[in-house]
Image (tube, grey):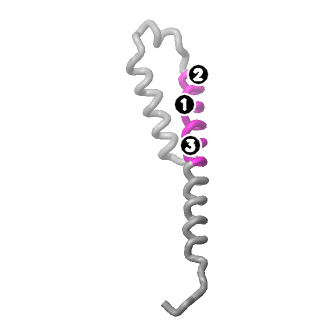
Amino acid sequence: MTTENNQLAEKVVTAFKSVLTDEALSHISEQEFHQLNLIVREALSQHLGQAATLVEGTARQLRDMTDHQDIGL
């Protein structure tokens, strides 16, 4: 997990905390916020993995397009 992902996950949790009422905040423990942070980080990791797979596929397609016989061009 990258530092950027960790920072983004922390920003998400902080933003979530900011929209909660004081009453709601009083019912959620720091451990539960930590769990939310882990969930966000996992989601980011999965999303980036899917993006990497798409990029790899596109790169493979581009390489396949360049595999041609040399006709002296």
Q: Position of residue 32 (x, y in %)?
A: 58, 20
- Mark 1 vs mark 3, foreground winner is 3
Looking at the rendering, the stretch of residues picked out in magenta corresponds to 31-50
Inter-mark Cα distance, 1 to 3: 15 Å
Using the image, tell me which numbered label, if any, was put on residue 31: 2
Tell me the crowding category of disc 3: few under 14, some 14 to 19, or many 20 or more residues within 10 angstroms, Cα based: few
- Residue indicated by mark 1: 37
The residue at 60%/65% (across/down) is 60
- Residue indicated by mark 3: 47
Label 3 SS: helix
User: Residue 65's image quarter?
Assistant: bottom right
The number of numbered discs placed on residues in the rendered structure image is 3
The residue at 60%/42% (across/down) is 46
Label 2 SS: helix
Q: Position of residue 21 (x, y in %)?
A: 40, 11
- Mark 3 vs mark 2, foreground winner is 3
Q: Position of residue 71 (x, y in %)?
A: 55, 90
